[in-house]
Amino acid sequence: MRLISILLVLFLIACAEEPTPNMKCIMVRASAYNSVPYQTRPGSSGTITAWGDTLVDSIPSIAVSRDLIDSGLTYGTMVKIYGYREKFVVNDKMNRRYRNKIDIHFGKDIRAARKFGIKKGVEICWEVPDSTFRKTLEE
């Protein structure tokens, strides 16, 4: 029995994810959007982001509220969203009226975006550069 307990503890230690240094994690509201003009910018193709990137379905992308940009979720930041295997790139920003929110790009799949809906309490994490991380610790 003791041997089984020791093996179980060793197994759990081996399976535990190593914490990544300088990671910042927060809880946000998440919604979904599509590459269609009525959801993005009327009069456009719906594929151009606020930073001028072209949205491509093969690149997992998110838009972030402006307050999150001030928190370090800047253009090009790679973000881990709890529940997803892949990382998402920040390449779009939302209207100033939104706070503490991300919008996940679902390409042209409107049905999938509607099924996703709006979720509260979604954990997102991203790596903070060393200088920014030290400044955050000092505050």
Image (cartoon, rainbow, N blue to C red):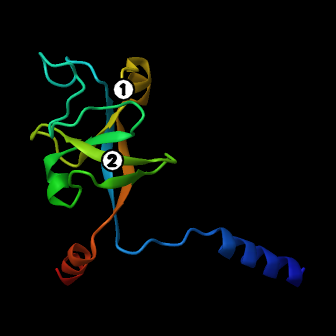
Residue 26, x across and y down, in percent: 32, 59
Camera-side residue of 45 and 99: 45
**Residue at position x 34%, y 60% in the image:** 126
**In this picture, is 125 found above or below 88?**
below
Which quarter of the image is occupied by the N terminus?
bottom right
Q: Which mark is residue 44?
A: none
In the rendered image, the quadrant that contains the C terminus is bottom left
Residue 118, relative to residue 23: is it above or below? Answer: above
Q: Element type at marker 2?
A: strand
State the residue at coordinates (9%, 41%).
Answer: 96
How far apart are the alpha carbons under marks 1 and 2?
14 Å
Secondary structure type for disc 1: loop
Q: Which mark is residue 89?
A: 2
Residue 128, picture quadrant: bottom left
- Residue at (27% x, 71% y) in the render: 129
Q: Which residue is mark 1?
A: 107
Among numbered discs 1 and 2, the one appearing first in the sequence: 2
As displayed, is residue 37 above or below residue 3? above
Q: Where on the picture, by quarter, is residue 94?
A: top left
Q: Is residue 12 left or right of residue 28?
A: right
Quarter residue 44 falls in: top left
Q: Amino acid at mark 1?
A: Gly
Q: Amino acid at mark 2?
A: Val
Question: 15 left or right of 119?
Answer: right
Q: Residue at (78%, 74%) from the top-left corner?
A: 8
Q: Position of residue 71 (x, y in %)?
A: 19, 60
Farthest residue, direction right: 1
* Left or right, 111 with reference to 8: left
Q: Looking at the image, is 38 positioned above or below residue 52?
A: above
The residue nearer to you, when weighing 106 against 139, is 106
Residue 116 horizontal/vertical position (percent):
42, 30
